[in-house]
Image (cartoon, rainbow, N blue to C red):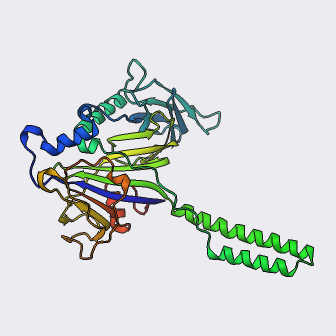
Amino acid sequence: MSIAVWALVLAWGLARPSSAGALGLPRAAWLQETSAAELEDSVRPARLSFARLDLHGPIHALAIEFQGLGRTSVHAELSAGERLQAVVPVPIASSNLGAGAQFRIDSNETQQSPAGRAAFAEERSASGWPLDAIRFERERQERWRALPLELRARPRPPAGEDVGVQVPSSGLYLALATAVLFAGMRKRPVWAGAVCVLGAASIWYVASASSALSSAAAITQRCVIEHEFGTGHWLLVRSSRGELRLGAHSPVSIESDPVDAQVTCVVDARKPSSARVQGPALWTVVEAFDPRGGELQPGANTLFDLDRVWSRGQGAQGIASGWSNARQWPRGEAASPLPGVAQPPPGWLLRGLPLGRSACIGKLRSGPGLDQLLAQAGVLEPGEL
């Protein structure tokens, strides 16, 4: 699986905001530009909550159907007499907690074996929803409202892009050789036909191999680490179409585009970090990210090795300067030792940036360092990049 990882830091301007206006003139311009003042009290709709299950074997697998919302498939592999309590994702409506759930146990045990049992670990509400799922959703909303306005208003990363198929030069050489052989054997129809069939098969094989390599190299997931300097808030936002692993930490939000897409969750009861969400939608997981004491801001980088980085400062009267040229920025260095390249930052990362604020955008370098960083954050297992 390939992954594109970016980092974005919103830094304070050169002049500290006045207490009268929270963020002073820059914030007033930002709110006026986006008409998003109502975001102070709004909560971004989530599609998943979490609930605890009490499982009593024998259970091979468990399906939990949620009316009109989706389903959760739990792989348990419990033998007779085994008990296990597992935290599983449960689909919710984009507007609110939806209808109750219906259990269906799919057991591969023989008919002579006792039937497995499953139940929510906590009582259910009047609508049939588990109380711990309701409590998790309430806590999620509190965590969301605690985030700075600028982070809540940030757009989500778009879907990954396919790098496309590049037919290798060997395919062209095969086509030319087939044409030459066919021309030389045009008086022998049988042999000429055999050459055409063999040439077409060879070209098809080469094109298929190239397509497989291109598919393997396609970007299937976009990941953005977002931070507002001075607040202590870091977010790791991951988006992928079709399937997305949830990770081991409790997310701030799990969203879908379209907002009411059918949700299918798959989880191993013995490995909660294996949970993933599936379906024909763009899935986004927002998690609190812990940089482990590192720092990333203009003039200081003790976190990441950046292959490309752009920065902009704040000029007089809260007017931001233009973006710098793209340059490398190794971790631990105050500034890049190499000259910049005239290249603009990606447009999808610029959307929704607040006006009049200094900022830094960077492309993180893949490798063991980034792999370990994401593993410590509980997002991806070591070696999954």
| Position of residue 47 in the picture relative to residue 163 (left or right) | left
Residue 376 sits in which quadrant?
bottom left
Looking at the rendering, in which quadrant would you find the C terminus?
Answer: bottom left
Above or below, 137 relative to 341: above
Residue 306 seen in the figure: no
Left or right: 12, with 133 as reference point: left
Answer above or below: position of 194 versus 384.
Answer: below
Image location (x, y in percent) of residue 372: 34, 63
Task: Measuring from the top left, give residue 187's x and y in whole percent.
Answer: 92, 78
Q: Nearer the viewer, residue 318 or 362?
A: 318
Marker count (numbered):
0
Residue drawn at (65%, 76%), measured in percent from left and top? 170
Pick the front one: 170 or 275: 170
Identify the residue at horizontal 22%, vertical 42% (top origin).
Answer: 30
Residue 165: image quadrant is bottom right
Near-viewer residue (27 or 297) = 27
Residue located farthest toward the bottom when viewing the structure as drawn? 184
Counting from the top left corner in percent of width and height, residue 246 is at: 41, 46
The quadrant holding residue 95 is top left
Q: Can you give x and y, in whole percent of width and height, for residue 63 in the image?
A: 54, 35
Asked whether 10 or 339 is in front, the reply is: 339
For this orientation, the residue located farthest to the left is 19
Is 17 left, or right, of 354 in this rendering? Answer: left
Camera sees residue 179: yes
